[in-house]
Image: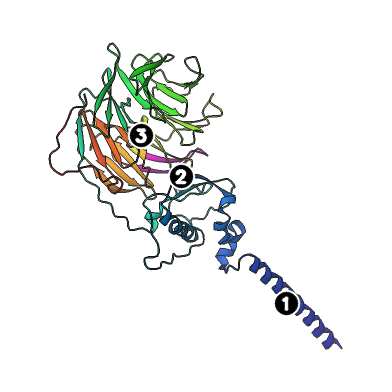
């Protein structure tokens, strides 16, 4: 009797197990019948396995979508899905011969809305990836493509720039979105048209000196900072002055636009915020630095402003609360002029220190945390992220006066360019991101083509270069 009862219980348990298995099987079938390993099952709680790709639009907001040609859309989408499988599920990509084509640029960038727990060192190979704001750390071409780039070691164009000041704290060149380079030479500002190579004199301050220039985001207006503390707005098309702002009592060494807001940093230790649509000299005065403000950069989304000073401090300001900085970063041991925001990863900020520091530091600006530092061996004068690849450009002073192109993920030097005989104090980038121009106290502007495949029209030569004058 006991034996029959035990058998009955066993049969009932078996039926229950069978019922549970059927339910589980049905559930798995409803989950699109994905077979996940034990490691993947742990991730399934956060990512729902491969369905993470199919639910991408619910969890992320597209902040940039480059226009692709029709024949590349399907293959790029396949590559994107393969990339996520490789990064999140650790699956190796499977290729079919000649079945896929890849473009040499980022197809997509994403900004995460929900906080998922993806702090897993196996997913990424670099601490520069901010796990709370998931983005593609490299372009698709770097993962799967066979893009081979040969960077010329000599500039393809050199312009003579008489009286280009050898002053670390000034910012005297900028390249507009309308492909016009502005160059400040002592009391004058000249405009060089990159398409026609035509040089136009915009202004002459006579009894004053130009200490900074910055183009508006649309590129039709140029802001000019002066030694006596004025900020002038000039119409580059009409070649006329639109407005003059006062408020600073010392030279304005750095300027930066964010939409209609113009920020200016001065030797008087102040940062002034101006809205070009409003009357008055400024609507906000920011005081935190103890010495000259020599670096200003707005984040790509216009939500944060980074300021660097001769007091070795880097401050982060929120656009919503501008009365005091939200973070105070004190790791640099020298003046912080070089500041750059990554266009590829939300919240990633790079900064460089002067002669006594010589380091490039990366920050999670959203949390005010240090991520990584790199000792460059020389004064860091400028930093700029590439628009095309996840790379960083730095220019340096004592003692090598070099330009360095870095791979961001591991800070590996891709190329080192030399040619200036003085410290490389000025840096600007063309609108398409293929070319940079550098300026130095040797009174020359040198043009370097970092991405030859992007622009094939430039005539690069390894021989001697004719050097026209900028004025």
- Which comes before the other along the chain, label 2 or label 3? 2
Q: Main secondary structure of the magenta part?
A: strand
Q: Quadrant of the N terminus?
A: bottom right
Q: Quadrant of the C terminus?
A: top left
**Residue 401 is at least partly visible in this image:** no
- Which comes before the other along the chain, label 2 or label 1? 1
- Image quadrant in which you'd find residue 52: bottom right
Residue that mark 3 sits on: 353
Q: Which residues are magenta?
A: 360-375
**Residue 345 is at least partly visible in this image:** yes
Q: Which callout, 1 or 3, points to the residue nearer the camera? A: 1
Q: Is residue 337 left or right of residue 370?
A: left
Q: Depth check: give the residue in front, 439 or 402.
A: 439
What kind of element bears circle 2? Answer: loop
What kind of element bears circle 3? Answer: strand
Q: Which callout, 2 or 3, points to the residue nearer the camera? A: 2
Residue that mark 2 sits on: 345
Disc 2 to disc 3, C-alpha distance: 22 Å
Residue 298 picture location, percent across and down: 45, 32
Residue 107 picture location, percent across and down: 43, 50
Which label sits on residue 18? 1
Q: Is residue 80 above or below residue 257?
A: below
- Number of labels in the image equals 3
- Which comes before the other along the chain, label 1 or label 3? 1
- Image quadrant in which you'd find residue 262: top left
- Which residue ends up furthest to the top in the rendered image? 207
Q: Are marks 2 and 3 in contact (CB under 8 Å)?
A: no
Disc 2 to disc 1, C-alpha distance: 49 Å
């Amino acid at each position: 009797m006991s034996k029959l009862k035990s058998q009955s219980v066993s049969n009932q348990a078996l039926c229950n197990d069978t019922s549970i298995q059927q339910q589980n099987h049905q559930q798995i079938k409803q989950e699109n019948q994905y077979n996940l390993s034990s490691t993947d099952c742990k991730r399934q709680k956060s990512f729902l396995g491969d369905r993470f790709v199919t639910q991408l639009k619910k969890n992320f907001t597209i902040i940039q979508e480059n226009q692709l040609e029709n024949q590349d859309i399907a293959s790029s989408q396949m590559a994107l899905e393969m990339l996520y499988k490789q990064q999140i599920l650790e699956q190796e990509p499977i290729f079919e011969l000649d079945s896929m084509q890849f473009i040499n640029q980022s197809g997509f960038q994403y900004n995460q809305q929900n906080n998922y727990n993806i702090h897993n060192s196996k997913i990424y190979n670099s601490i520069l990836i901010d796990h709370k704001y998931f983005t593609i750390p490299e372009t698709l071409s770097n993962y799967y493509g066979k893009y081979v780039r040969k960077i010329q070691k000599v500039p393809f164009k050199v312009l003579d720039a008489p009286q280009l000041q050898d002053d670390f704290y000034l910012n005297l060149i900028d390249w507009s979105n309308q492909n016009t380079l502005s160059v400040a030479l002592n009391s004058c500002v000249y405009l060089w048209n990159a398409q026609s190579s035509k040089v136009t004199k915009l202004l002459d301050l006579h009894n004053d000196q130009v200490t900074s220039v910055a183009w508006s985001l649309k590129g039709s207006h140029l802001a000019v900072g002066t030694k006596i503390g004025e900020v002038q707005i000039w119409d580059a098309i009409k070649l006329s002055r639109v407005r003059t702002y006062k408020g600073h009592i010392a030279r304005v060494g750095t300027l930066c636009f964010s939409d209609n807001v113009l920020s200016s940093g001065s030797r008087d230790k102040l940062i002034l915020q101006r809205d070009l649509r409003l009357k008055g000299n400024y609507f906000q005065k920011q005081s935190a630095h103890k010495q000259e403000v020599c670096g200003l950069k707005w984040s790509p989304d216009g939500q944060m402003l980074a300021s660097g000073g001769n007091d070795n401090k880097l401050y982060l300001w929120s656009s919503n609360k501008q009365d005091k900085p939200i973070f105070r970063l004190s790791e640099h041991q020298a003046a912080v002029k070089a500041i750059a925001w990554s266009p590829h990863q939300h919240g990633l900020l790079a900064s460089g220190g002067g002669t006594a520091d010589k380091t490039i530091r990366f920050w999670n600006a959203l949390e005010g945390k240090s991520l990584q530092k790199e000792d460059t061996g020389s004064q860091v004068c400028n930093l700029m992220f590439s628009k095309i690849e996840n790379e960083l450009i730095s220019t340096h002073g004592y003692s090598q006066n070099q330009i360095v192109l870095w791979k961001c993920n591991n800070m590996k030097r891709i190329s080192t360019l030399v040619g200036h005989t003085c410290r490389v104090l000025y840096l600007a980038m063309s609108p398409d991101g293929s070319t940079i121009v550098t300026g130095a106290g040797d009174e020359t502007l040198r043009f370097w083509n970092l991405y030859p495949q992007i622009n094939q029209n430039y005539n690069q030569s390894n021989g001697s270069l004719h050097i026209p004058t900028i004025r």
